[in-house]
Amino acid sequence: MSSLDERAVSTATSVSIAKPVGPICNLHCDYCYYLDTVDLFARDERFRMSEQVLERYVAGAIAGAITSPVHFVWHGGEPLLAGRAFYESAFELQRRYLPAGWTCLNSMQTNGTLLDDRWATFIAEHHVAVGLSIDGHPAAHDRLRRDRRGRETHARVLAALARLRAHGVEPDILCTVNAVSATDPLTLYRYLRDLGVSWIQFIPVVARDHDGVVTAQSVTPEAFGAFLCAVFDEWVRHDVNRLVVQGFLEGLFVTTSGHGTLCVSAETCGQVLAIEHDGSVYSCDHFVDRAHRLGSLRTDSLSQLANSTRQKDFTAAKRDALPTQCRDCTVLAFCRGGCPKDRFTSTAAGEPGLNYLCAGYRRFFEHARTRLERMGELVARRQRPSLIMTELANAEASRERSFELSRRNDPCPCGSGRKFKNCCLMLRGLIAPATRRDGRVTSQSDVNTPASTPTVGDAGEAKPAPTP
């Protein structure tokens, strides 16, 4: 079975995100939303999680878990800066506090530039899942992901990928969609695919400056929608059996179960708390600010903070604060209003709370919905969703045969209602258009030339010519 076929049924886990070195990182990516959180701490802050905080975190996460495995996500900043001894202590604490028969899943999100053979060996020995940040090919990656000395990092990330694979570890790939990478979606996607990766998560960059203005590095809603549509068309036609694109998998989950599994596509959010190095607990990784600080592991239990009234209000707000335009939207089940951090625009009626990326999400889900629903039908029949590739190939071949058999004056197979000669035959360039004295477009040829490939529009349908 392919990766997507294997992951077509979701598995619930108890998850939390920890920042063992806070926002400290050896890179200085132009779009990073987390570096500014350094201002929350004193100038002489050590930015290192203590043994006391680590133990309270591990014990509290396990005590509050509702199911096994208990998922620990080690994040940053750059989590490798904490050192291997830190994680040895963490894994020993997990073994000490886990109930009999329970397990832990440890994941590490890294930029990869510090990942040497010793780290690769350690990660493999402890079965740590790895998320590796690669923003595509060098031209896209190195434009915005440089180290603190301004040096390019792409080659070092590829070296980390090779080391992990040499030790039997296949990382998931996290790739941002930003103002640079969104300009050529297929080149970027094919580059990542040809690296042989099995999982890609595309993360839209939406950042604002201190005045609330969207930054130049951010992707526009229109570019984000176009990016997703282009990548989906390539993936669903050729790659469903080769790799998983997380956002597309979430769409499939909606068609099979009625809801997504990620916070961004779920009806409510706030189930994944962010734990800073000093024990401070925040509502979400994207809301590490004073307004969303719930308390501290030094004085409160993780379970108490997760079930506090403030956090419950935060959780419900994703659903309850939706503007009317979202509530009435035909693709609400797929996007659920998107991440609350990006809900800073207004609807056409002037109601606040619309997601900045709304137009992009809507374009994509309207574009992909029929094919996602068909994949859901395959899953419901206990068939592989990757079978859609064969179905699409057969449909394309059938449509091509219809074009080949059509004569000039036949109705165009694309369904436009116009004659073939005035529609796709002309669009294929097999006959040259000529203009009559009355301005009408006609043909210079009476030859019934076989057609080849139809012009494809935004929704995967043959695109008719403009009405004469």
Image (cartoon, grey):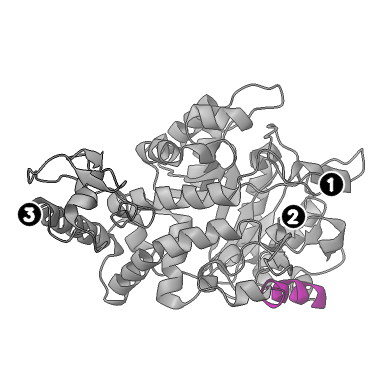
What x and y, as percent, mark residue 251? Answer: 45, 65
> What is the magenta segment's predominant secondary structure?
helix
The residue that appears at 71% across and 56% down in the rendered structure is 285
Which residue in the protein does label 3 denote? 405
Q: Residues within 10 Å of mark 2 (few under 14, many from 20)?
A: many
What x and y, as percent, mark residue 310? Answer: 81, 73
Q: Comparing marks 1 and 3, which lies closer to the viewer? A: 3
Which residue in the protein does label 2 denote? 54
What x and y, as percent, mark residue 190? Answer: 38, 39
Q: Which is nearer the eye, 151 or 429? A: 429
Q: Which of the marked residues, 2 or 1, is nearer the chain's N terminus?
A: 2
Question: What numbered label is drawn on residue 211?
Answer: 1
Residue 151 visible from this viewpoint: yes
Q: Which residues are magenta?
A: 309-322
Viewed as shown, does residue 291 lie left or right of 414? right
Q: Which of the marked residues, 3 or 2, is nearer the chain's N terminus?
A: 2
The residue that appears at 72% across and 41% down in the rendered structure is 215
Q: Residues within 10 Å of mark 3 (few under 14, many from 20)?
A: some
The residue that appears at 52% across and 27% down in the rendered structure is 139
Residue 116 visible from this viewpoint: no
Q: Is residue 116 above or below residue 413?
A: above
Q: Is residue 366 above or below residue 86?
A: below
Q: Comparing marks 3 and 2, which lies closer to the viewer? A: 3
Marks 3 and 2 sit apart, C-alpha to C-alpha, by 71 Å
Q: Which is nearer the eye, 169 or 153? A: 153
Q: Which is nearer the eye, 437 or 243? A: 437
Q: Is residue 318 above or below residue 133?
A: below
Marks 2 and 1 sit apart, C-alpha to C-alpha, by 36 Å
Residue 290: in magenta span = no
Q: Label 3 is placed on what type of residue?
A: Leu
Q: Secondary structure at mark 3?
A: helix
Question: What numbered label is drawn on residue 41?
Answer: none
